[in-house]
Image (cartoon, rainbow, N blue to C red):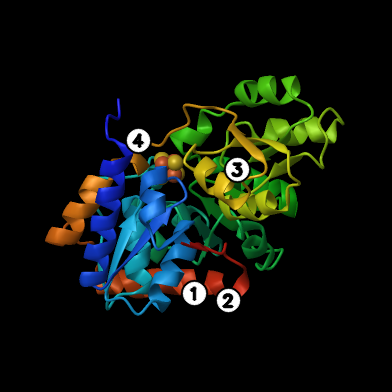
Amino acid sequence: MNTRTDEKTKALQEKIRELAARKDAVILAHNYQSPEVQDVADFTGDSLALSRLAADSSAGTIIFAGVHFMAETAKILSPQKRVLIPDATAGCSLADCINADQLRAWKAEHPGAVVVSYANTTAEVKAETDICCTSANAVDVVNSIPADQEVLFCPDRNLAAHVKRVTGRENLVIWDGACHVHAEMTPEILMDRILAEPEAEVYIHPECGGTQAAVDLIEEGKLDKDKVKILSTGGMIVEARKAPAGTRVLMATEVGMLHALRKANPDATFEPLKADAKCPFMNQTTLDNLVTCLETGKDEVFVDPEIIEKARASVERMISIGKTAQPLKH
Ligand code: SF4
């Protein structure tokens, strides 16, 4: 149980802001962070949008309130800067689904294929990747590849299936990985609630296990395609801003996203489709370890310069193709 009072939270947040100013640090918080961490950050958004913004920032130190691959991505785009993460053990079940050796072996089985990796991968995997992508631009990235060229898409099978469906790309080969938080948002869990509340709008992140079932029901005419939308986290914010006052929205992604949506549109109501969809890794960041991170400079994130160079090329290819979500400034 969280017994911290509002006054203590506010005092810690003030301390963090004062330390960040003194240490020339910019604080980035992923959309899945706790509300109190999001509120103390300079920017909130998805991992790539935040990393691009950190690269443009004049601050010498980047604090990434998120999981380890995100801090690595910030380092890839800002190798000359010091990148810190409040808890270096904060991992990601999706990024853990494929390592560089596995990707090399997969590539060897598919000579000539183009590798597209989701941002939720380690720096080593990005270094073995041709083009990186986010959930916002994965379709554009795959569409940029000549139609006769095979595509290896990793590591998320649900996002990959969504991209395959939208692009109609038969030669897209899917790695069998998933985020455990999103995979648990199964067809049954999503559909029971959606069908019980037909008047509500629905935002579904394509990593969710129930994405395909929602699309099937839309195609069968059992769900209203204008109400049920498959969206990246950045896309959800854009959609939330457009929702008329009084709109009720059911959302399927990590529950930290609710804070960003409610801030984006205080006149609409946002509810989770699965209230316990909480990422344990994201929640390893707290105000207390943010203070420690700023005071001690731990944990610093290092990436081999050779890996940085190769990984950066895959991210830059993505940037030259498509859009990334816009982070929010606080
Ligand atoms: S929500 Fe899933 S994909 Fe995101 S950091 Fe947590 S485990 Fe990884």
Other residues around mark 2 within 10 Å, as few (<14) / some (14–19) / many (≥20): few
Residue farthest to the left, as pictured: 296
| Residue topped by disc 3 | 205
Q: Which residue type does callout 2 highlight?
A: Ser
Q: Quadrant of the N terminus?
A: top left
From the viewer's side, name the closer residue of 183 and 42.
42
Give the CA distance from mark 1 to mark 2: 6 Å
**Residue 316: which numbered mark, if any?**
1
At 25% from the left edge and 42% from the top edge, which residue is drawn?
8
Other residues around mark 1 within 10 Å, as few (<14) / some (14–19) / many (≥20): few
SS for callout 3: loop
Other residues around mark 3 within 10 Å, as few (<14) / some (14–19) / many (≥20): many
| Residue topped by disc 2 | 320
Q: Which residue type does callout 1 highlight?
A: Glu
| Residue topped by disc 4 | 280
Residue 257 lies, with reference to residue 136, above or below; the image says above
